[in-house]
């Protein structure tokens, strides 16, 4: 397993993709998450990937506000279905009725920040992977392009 200390990404190692650790603040809590960078073993990351990460870290408060709102709206659209599947006893544990974004912080935990491979369109692409109480198999994924939240759905959208 190849390991390097990248000037921007820090200590990372290669095993099919590059990974290390980074910290993000979500729902008012600073959390350490896995940092994954799509790339080849030569660690020749594109300037756009580096810019995507730099911009995310520099504008984290604003971006994460949009991420939290996006997840909240996704939850509002879907939680009743999960409550129905869970049954009365479990419903309030896994998919409680909530009215604020702050309450969502008890249900969602970020686990991975993915710096995606650059496509021909040159878009800065980041994926945020989260575990959640209401869907332990699929979790929640947030697709961020050019520092804007584009989609919130199952984790598959960013993996």
Image: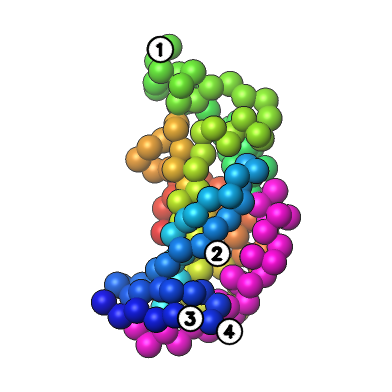
Discs 3, 1 touching: Cβ within 8 Å? no
Q: Is residue 145 above or below residue 3?
A: above
Task: Write the start and end of the magenta stretch as one range.
Answer: 41-66
Mark 3: few, some, or many residues within 10 Å (few <14, many ≥20)?
few
Secondary-structure class at tag 2: strand
Quarter holding the N terminus is: bottom left
Secondary-structure class at tag 1: helix
Secondary-structure class at tag 3: strand
Q: Which residue is mark 2?
A: 126
Taking 106 as reference, is 5 left or right?
A: left
Can residue 155 be seen?
yes
Q: Nearer the viewer, residue 13 or 92?
A: 13
Residue found at the very far top of the displayed protein: 88
Q: What label does residue 6 carry, if any?
A: 3
The Cα atoms of the two marked residues, 3 and 1, are separated by 49 Å
Q: Which residue is mark 1?
A: 89
The Cα atoms of the two marked residues, 1 and 4, are separated by 51 Å
Q: Which residue is mark 4?
A: 47
The Cα atoms of the two marked residues, 3 and 2, are separated by 18 Å
User: Considering only order in the chain, which callout, 1 or 2, is on the residue closer to the N terminus?
Assistant: 1
Mark 2: few, some, or many residues within 10 Å (few <14, many ≥20)?
many
Residue found at the very far left of the displayed protein: 1
Q: Is residue 22 magenta?
A: no
The Cα atoms of the two marked residues, 2 and 1, are separated by 37 Å
Eye-nearest disc, 3 or 4: 3
Taking 135 as reference, is 50 left or right?
A: right
Q: Residue 120 placed where, x, y %?
A: 54, 81
């Amino acid at each position: 397993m190849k390991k390097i200390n990248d000037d921007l990404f820090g200590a990372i190692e290669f095993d099919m993709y590059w990974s290390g650790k980074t910290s993000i603040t979500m729902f008012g809590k600073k959390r350490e998450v896995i940092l994954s960078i799509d790339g080849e073993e030569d660690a020749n990351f594109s300037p756009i990937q580096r810019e995507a990460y730099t911009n995310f870290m520099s504008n984290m408060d604003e971006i994460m506000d949009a991420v939290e709102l996006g997840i909240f709206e996704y939850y509002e659209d879907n939680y009743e279905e999960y409550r129905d599947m869970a049954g009365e006893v479990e419903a309030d544990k896994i998919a409680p009725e909530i009215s604020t974004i702050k309450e969502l912080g008890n249900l969602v935990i970020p686990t991975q920040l993915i710096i995606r491979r650059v496509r021909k369109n040159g878009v800065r692409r980041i994926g945020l992977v989260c575990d959640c109480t209401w869907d332990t198999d699929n979790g929640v994924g947030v697709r961020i392009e050019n520092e804007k939240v584009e989609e919130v759905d199952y984790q598959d959208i960013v993996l």
